[in-house]
Amino acid sequence: MFQNAKIDLSKRQMEDPLVTFVYEQDNNRVFFEYEILLCAIFSAKSTKLGDTFLQMSKHEFINILNDVGLLILPKKKSAEEEKKEKEAREKQIAGQPITAEQ
């Protein structure tokens, strides 16, 4: 199980650019550091559906995070950085070793 390459997030990011777009370490750190605050916001602002769970739209949740300053927008990558990432992905697909600078 632990030998599966799909477990390693950095390898998955190289294979699938969508994972890189979705997973941002800084945003995940915010969720970890402000877990109690986010739980309180969600509990106070969400809608109770039935007796079992709360629900909040993603749009509303993102707006709240933006209003309180917890949302970290991804940094734009330069053309050179994007080119290096693309070359690294192509080399990995072709089976060539990736150099340290990539």
Image: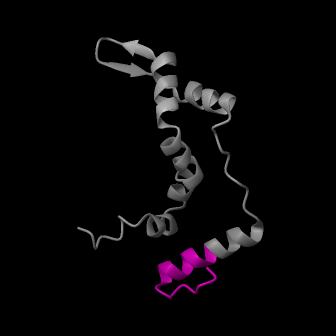
Q: Is residue 12 left or right of residue 4?
A: right
Q: Is residue 20 left or right of residue 51?
A: right
Residue 89 within the magenta-colored segment of the rendering: yes
Tell me the residue at 53%/38% (across/down). Answer: 34
**Residue 20 included in the magenta stretch of the image:** no
Above or below — where is 67 with respect to 86?
Answer: above
Picture residue at 47% right of the left edge, 32% below the top:
36
The correct choice, above or below, for 1 with respect to 53 in the image is below
What x and y, as percent, mark residue 6? 36, 65
Residue nearest the observer in this picture, 36 or 52: 36
Q: How many marks?
A: 0
Most extreme residue toward the left is 1
Q: Quadrant of the C terminus?
A: bottom right
Q: Residue at x 72, y 61 (%)?
A: 77
Q: Residue at x 56, y 44 (%)?
A: 30
Q: Which residues make up the magenta segment?
A: 86-102
74 relative position to 6: left or right: right
Compared to 93, does 37 lie above or below? above
